[in-house]
Image: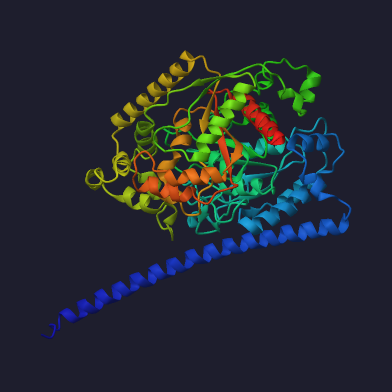
């Protein structure tokens, strides 16, 4: 039948409205892509400016040996810069050149801070220079730097330059450091890969088919490749420790408020259940110690009064040796860590939630033996209820509002693939989350528990959760003190997974996220590499649940011979110096073993 005449205008009106809606969406989509292209163009222009600056310096100073500068450790470099035997310009352009090379290979730098050249030209400050005088440092995208975007991989954050530096960056500058680049992150930061629509995928400098880890993946790649001597990232579930472990470097996740987080953007701002932290990344432990000493100063405490005024404890870090003022000045020398005072160290090989790879288990066992041979006491620590902590404290705690705050960040974005299936599950209403959780339970109990943990909580439930987390922390500390432990040796997920795998393996954060929930300082030190024997043993890897995640993790571990594997070194809250002391002991013993071999 032909439509009635009266219905024709209505039909045309509906068609027109539909076409108008499509046109508006297309225009909006086009504007967003134009922003992305402009950001990529700025990124490339920044790299071109880096290249021109390096070329100009080399033409004017052809005799400067950049290789020798890059070979210096941070303590050695700092000493030479402060005593005037090495010009800051030589150091800056040496690292600018190397950073350019590494980012061309790994795509780790998102923005070159051209004002760093101006800062470099400023006269040497009057009086005694800061501990980081003249040291070029790299900064994670989410740490605010005046005049630069903190995108978190979101298109909406392009062309939104920050009005002022974060407290961390302000203190770095007052200590004489020169922030010179910002580095890549995964979209939203809630991932241990490193990819977003704006700047693309960052690659592991050790093997380009592997992820550098995340969310501080750009930092891991740049430092692991030698393009930065000191960098800064954040950690809410392993975001410092994953990149360090995957790229073969060191990192320290301090107690949540040991360093200021003012001006640092969080992936899920406002949540308090899983404690985020800002921390340093470097090639070795001495560099981390020097960095912490520089940052834990009056400037940090004055600029952010919420940070406890706890200066760096030299005595703890030097293994109980009281240092004279002369020795403090010479702290950069390696003998500061040479004390043989024994430690009482707890350890465990698995958390019984994520089955360790053969290389992970071997890393803990070999490190345990090295420590015992060196005179330390190793005590087995029974780790329990990690599954409960993961589901109820971490997932439920971070997304206690039913994922509402998290989902808001994706509104109007062009892509959400960085969080994969998790995003679509998060969008489900409570009733459907309960239903899907019930359906999934017989086939994938871990997925079922995670979906159930993503429901919306009442205020009463959230307060109850916070109380439960506090009680759990007290119980963990009581167990620790019952064994009279100083520190803890723990596994660290590794080796580096293939690109794309982290998005399929959100449950694999159990080894790291535990210490965000407890708010303990935790550092990562590389101790070994994957061997052919590890690869053979991996054929029998099944996992504790034998579910899809376990099968996927086994695939992600394969083909990793020669890649680094790390351990975690953990201390009680506010004992970063003791954590560093333990990390240094592990590092020293590992290096000695490798020299003998």
Of the pair 439 and 368, the residue shown nearer to us: 368
Is residue 211 at least partly visible in the picture?
Answer: yes
- Where residue 262 sits, quadrant-wise, is top right
Most extreme residue toward the bottom is 2
> In this rendering, would 11 be left or right of 263?
left
Q: Which residue is rendered at x = 14% and y = 84% of the image?
A: 5
- Tell me where residue 364 appears, x and y as whole percent: 54, 31
Eyeballing the image, is 169 above or below 25? above
- Tell me where residue 316 appears, x and y as whole percent: 65, 19
Eyeballing the image, is 12 above or below 514? below
Q: Which residue is rendered at x = 48% and y = 66% of the image?
A: 31
Numbered label tally:
0
Is residue 522 at least partly visible in the picture?
Answer: no
> In this rendering, would 415 be left or right of 151?
left
Q: Which residue is rendered at x = 37% and y = 49% of the image?
A: 422
- Tell me where residue 195 appears, x and y as whole percent: 51, 54
Most extreme residue toward the left is 1
Of the pair 494 and 533, the residue shown nearer to us: 533
Q: Quadrant of the C terminus?
A: top right
Q: Quadrant of the N terminus?
A: bottom left
Image colouring: rainbow
- Tell me where residue 506 appears, x and y as whole percent: 41, 45
Most extreme residue toward the right is 63
Eyeballing the image, is 507 above or below 590? below
> In this rendering, would 418 be left or right of 143?
left
């Amino acid at each position: 039948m032909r439509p009635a005449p009266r219905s024709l205008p209505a039909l045309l009106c509906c068609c027109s409205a539909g076409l108008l809606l499509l046109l508006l969406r297309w225009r909006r989509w086009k504007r967003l892509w134009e922003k992305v292209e402009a950001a990529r163009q700025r990124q490339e222009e920044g790299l071109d400016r880096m290249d021109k600056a390096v070329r100009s310096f080399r033409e004017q100073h052809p005799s400067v040996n950049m290789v020798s500068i890059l070979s210096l450790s941070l303590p050695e470099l700092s000493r030479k810069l402060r005593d005037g035997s090495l010009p800051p310009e030589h150091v800056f352009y040496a690292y600018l050149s190397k950073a350019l090379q590494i980012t061309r290979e790994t795509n780790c730098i998102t923005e070159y801070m051209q004002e760093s050249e101006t800062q470099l030209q400023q006269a040497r400050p009057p009086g005694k220079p800061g501990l980081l005088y003249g040291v070029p440092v790299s900064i994670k995208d989410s740490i605010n730097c005046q005049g630069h975007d903190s995108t978190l991989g979101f298109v909406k954050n392009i062309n939104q330059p920050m009005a002022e530096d974060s407290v961390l960056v302000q203190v770095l500058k007052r200590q004489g450091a020169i922030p010179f680049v910002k580095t890549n992150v995964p979209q939203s930061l809630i991932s241990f890969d490193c990819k977003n629509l704006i700047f693309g995928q960052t690659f592991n400098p050790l093997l380009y088919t592997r992820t550098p880890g995340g969310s501080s993946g750009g930092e891991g790649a740049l430092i692991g490749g030698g393009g930065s001597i000191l960098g800064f990232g954040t950690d809410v579930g392993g975001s410092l420790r994953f990149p360090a472990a995957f790229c073969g470097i060191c990192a320290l996740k301090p107690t949540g408020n040991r360093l200021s987080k003012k001006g640092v953007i969080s992936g899920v701002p406002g949540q308090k259940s899983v404690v985020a932290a800002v921390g340093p990344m470097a090639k070795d432990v001495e560099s981390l110690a020097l960095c912490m000493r520089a940052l834990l100063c009056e400037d940090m405490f004055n600029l952010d009064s919420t940070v406890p005024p706890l200066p760096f404890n030299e005595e703890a870090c030097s293994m109980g040796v009281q240092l004279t003022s002369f020795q403090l000045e010479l702290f950069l020398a390696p003998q500061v860590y040479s004390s043989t005072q024994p430690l009482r160290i707890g350890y465990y090989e698995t958390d019984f939630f994520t089955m360790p790879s053969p290389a992970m288990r071997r890393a803990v066992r070999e490190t345990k033996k090295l420590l015992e041979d060196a005179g330390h006491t190793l005590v087995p620590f029974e780790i329990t209820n990690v599954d409960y902590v993961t589901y109820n404290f971490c997932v439920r705690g971070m997304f206690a509002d039913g994922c509402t705050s998290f989902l808001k960040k994706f509104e109007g974005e062009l892509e959400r693939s960085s969080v994969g299936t998790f995003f679509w599950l998060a969008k489900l209403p409570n009733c459907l989350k309960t239903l899907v959780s019930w359906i999934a339970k017989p086939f994938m109990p871990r997925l079922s528990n995670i979906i159930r943990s993503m429901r919306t909580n009442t205020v009463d439930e959230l307060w109850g959760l916070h109380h439960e987390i506090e009680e759990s922390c007290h119980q963990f500390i009581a167990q620790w003190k019952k064994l009279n432990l100083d520190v803890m040796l723990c596994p660290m997920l590794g080796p580096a997974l293939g690109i794309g795998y982290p998005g399929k393996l959100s449950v694999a954060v159990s080894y790291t996220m535990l210490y965000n929930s407890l708010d303990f300082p935790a550092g990562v030190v590389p101790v070994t590499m994957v061997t052919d024997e590890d690869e053979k043993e991996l054929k029998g890897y099944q996992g504790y649940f034998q579910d899809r995640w376990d099968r996927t993790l086994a695939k992600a571990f394969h083909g990793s011979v020669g890649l680094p594997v790390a351990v975690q070194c953990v201390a009680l809250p506010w004992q970063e110096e003791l954590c560093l002391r333990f990390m240094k002991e592990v590092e020293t013993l590992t290096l000695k073993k490798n020299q003998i071999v």
